[in-house]
Amino acid sequence: MMNVSCTPTISHLYNSTCSLEDNELQSFRARAERMMRQTQSTICAALEKLDGTGFTEEVWTSPDLNTSYTDRVLRNGNLFQMVAVNVAVAQSTFSPETARAATGGCLKVDEPLPFFVASLSLVIHAHNPMVPSAHGHYRYFETGCDAAPQHWWFGGGADLTPNYLFEEDVAHFHRTHREICDRYDPSYYPRFKKWCDEYFFIAHRRERRGVGGIFFDNLNDCDRETLFEFLTECAGAFPLSYLPIVRKRQDLPFTERHRHWKQLRAGRYVEFNLIYDRGTVFGLKSGGRIASVLRGLPQHARWEYQQIPVEGSEEAKMVDVLVTPREWA
């Protein structure tokens, strides 16, 4: 991987220096962005070590929108088919339409509203059908000016999308996130687990995209410093929740039948992302970079007419869990 330790914050996008001034160190926006970039580097390093293949990086900026995307992508690695670990930072203006899209209708405005967002998103798809796909997204939003924001909130979470069900893997993924949630508020995990099951729901299929995890948005129910620590811990725990599963399943044998089923499940993944995912809708409506917005789609997907798994099969067991979520931790 190229050395990116000097990646600038949004306020330095168009300057030649990468150093942070003292006043920036006091800015919550700069702190949030720096956390996203540091976590991006940590996660990429862990994935590179496991896969043995390096990431490529592309930085895209839009002076008109005051937006920056830092995309790190690993394609056709030894273990992973596609990994994208991206940081997006924007300081722009909400239209009433994008405000609703970004907040699920919670933020209702009738005129343009200045906003700031720093976010880290990652999507992982493996070659082996026995290794689940995984997704994480962590973000900080503000509206108004930096010195006195009108509104601020955190959002994020992580979820697991297996092709085949290994119950101990799902339990480990959920347990890792529950331990973090419980340190901050015992109500967080049951609340965010339920929210995840409901959010990643493919309504026209009557099933979930995967086996869930945690999902939260518009979170501002206690002081900002505490919630920032919570978000930082959640983002930093992603490798702990996911990489042990990869190590356990990466060498399991699989057949063409397993690969075929993986592609069908990837089709469901595409359906959710293009029809229901708020992040995708926001990225497209706000003029985001298309390659960055759609980077999480799997490389290979398929659809078949009336595809129904054989009763009692491993594929049918997987669908049963997607239709009826379980408690895992």
Image: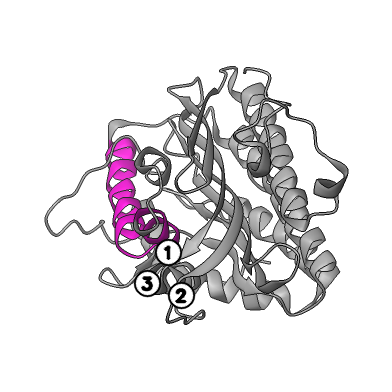
**Rendered view: 30 above or below 182:** above
Q: Which of marks 3 and 1 is in front?
A: 3
Residue beneath label 1, please?
A: 278
Which element carries disc 2, helix, strand or loop?
Answer: loop
Which secondary structure type mostly characterizes the magenta part of the structure? helix
- Relative to 233, is 104 on the left or the right? left
Q: What residue range appears in magenta?
A: 257-284
Residue beneath label 3, please?
A: 97
Q: Are marks 3 and 1 in contact (CB under 8 Å)?
A: no
Callout 3: 10 Å neighbours few (<14), some, many (20+)? some
Q: Which residue occupies the foreground of this view, 179 or 287? A: 287
Q: Do the residues labelled 2 and 1 touch (CB within 8 Å)?
A: yes
Spatial CA distance of label 3 from label 1 is 12 Å
Q: In which quarter of the image is the N terminus?
A: top right
Spatial CA distance of label 2 from label 1 is 7 Å
Residue beneath label 2, please?
A: 104
